[in-house]
Image (tube, grey):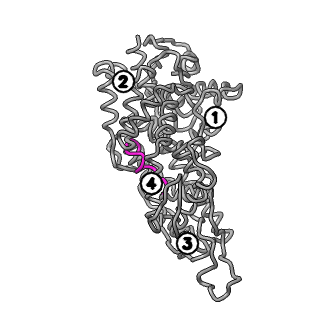
Amino acid sequence: MAARLREDRLLSRATFGARLGDREALSAIGAERWVERELSSRTTASGNSTRDPLLRNRLKRFTSLGRSARELLAGAAPDDEPMMGAGPGARPNKEQRRELMQLSRRIGREAAGARVVRAVHGENGLYEVMIDFWANHFSVNARKPLLGAVLPHYLDQTLVPHALGRFEDLLLATAQSPAMLIYLDNWNSTAPRTNPRRRRDRNQRRRGPGGINENYARELLELHTLGVYGGYDQRDVIEVANVFTGWSIKSRRDPSFRFDNALHVSGLKRVLGAQIREAGEAEGRRLIRQLAEHPSTATHISSKLVQRFVADTPPASLVTRASQRYLETGGEISAVLRVILLSPEFSEAENQKLKTPLRLLASALRATGGSTDGGPGVLRTLERMGEVPFGARSPAGYPETAREWINPGSLLARMNLAFALEGRRIPGTRLGRSQPEVGNTNRRQRSTARDARALMLASGDFQWS
């Protein structure tokens, strides 16, 4: 019974849902070999160059994938150069801001749609689940001005290549990603100094936003690495903010990473009791390594992974084993996942998980052989249900626990989703012809009634895994 439950949960939690034939294929090779196969799907491919040929074809409709933000923004942003003391480039006028906002949101919707398509149609299920996990852990919101334009880069170059790799590599990639730099305002975090172009007038302060911004430093410690109880204080936040001054973008027209030493706070820093002696950009790289190797980070990341795959209240013993493996392997995420997915706790019957809206939608389509184009119709549906990709309202991302998703409104929305799918009322998204399997008995339920399948998708057996 435990072996069967483990197989069911591997398909419902370590992928976005079982497809026709997946259960038989998993049973034929066993849980351990299946996990090894999924973990070996690590790839450096990005964007439309994914090794999954069927997925690659579906992603072709998102023409912004695989293109740089400079290319995507050509003609929409002012033809500016970085201006010392005035932020990255000249500010666009009102008409340019409106055009830039519209273009940025269109590009951002493509990145969100691509994530939905990957969830529904990706062959490497665990890989796609981990892309989604990290997109939520390192959450950014597409509605922030200019951010949508850099989301294809964030998906292609930051999340996809590092989803099953070393945490340190992913942490550095997010720190240098234009999406994170813009979202948490680090692109404007600079040493408080007079404008270098106006040195003769000592009363002339630097123009533009300017000064040290602590947003990224605080979220780096609290959300991305150590956790809220990870042993840091406000002095550490300030020092981390000093370390990352000068980590910015080239300009609004070319929002790619640059380090500007002239905007960096020089001098010795001390974070978590350790001195950082390097100069310039090397300070940030050194701190990234220090945080990635910290025991509190190992516990925080392991706890979130256990919560995602096992239980809303993570079993302490499993968190301990997972964090030990994290430290032993230098933060190899695949090694930590192996411990979690093959643990006894993973297949304990009482450790149930409620599917979030995106997982519910994807699993319904996968169970029936359905499809989605990732277009406006499905994005509006997910937004109404409270989980559209790149749409979380806080840097903490979307909640993972069932209590955050259960209320009268959300329960009605889940029921409505099932009937909207059955009635083909979501443009570009439709169920297939297969019947979903519900419960742990692997029993196929067949009915000719029009609403029978919608009721299956709305049932507790399908909503929980």
Q: Is residue 411 left or right of residue 173?
A: right
Q: Say if the magenta span includes residue 173.
A: yes
Estimate the spatial distance between the alpha carbons at disc 1 and disc 4, rounded to whole Å.
32 Å
**In the rendered structure, which disc, 2 or 1, sits on the residue that comes first in sequence?**
2
Mark 1 or 4: the one toward you: 4
Q: Quick one: which residue is furthest to the front in this view?
A: 273
Please tell me whether mark 4 sits on a helix, a strand or a loop.
helix
Q: Residue at x 42, y 45 (%)?
A: 167
Q: Residue at x 47, y 56 (%)?
A: 287
Q: Residue 40: x percent and y percent?
A: 30, 37
Q: Which residue is mark 4?
A: 172
Q: Is residue 49 left or right of residue 415?
A: left
Tag 2–tag 1 contact (CB < 8 Å): no
Neighbor class of circle 3 (other Cα within 10 Å; few <14, some 14-19, many 20+) is many
Q: Residue 27: x percent and y percent?
A: 32, 18
Residue type at mark 4: give it: Leu
Please tell me whether mark 1 sits on a helix, a strand or a loop.
helix
Q: Which residue is mark 1?
A: 385
Q: Which residues are magenta?
A: 163-175
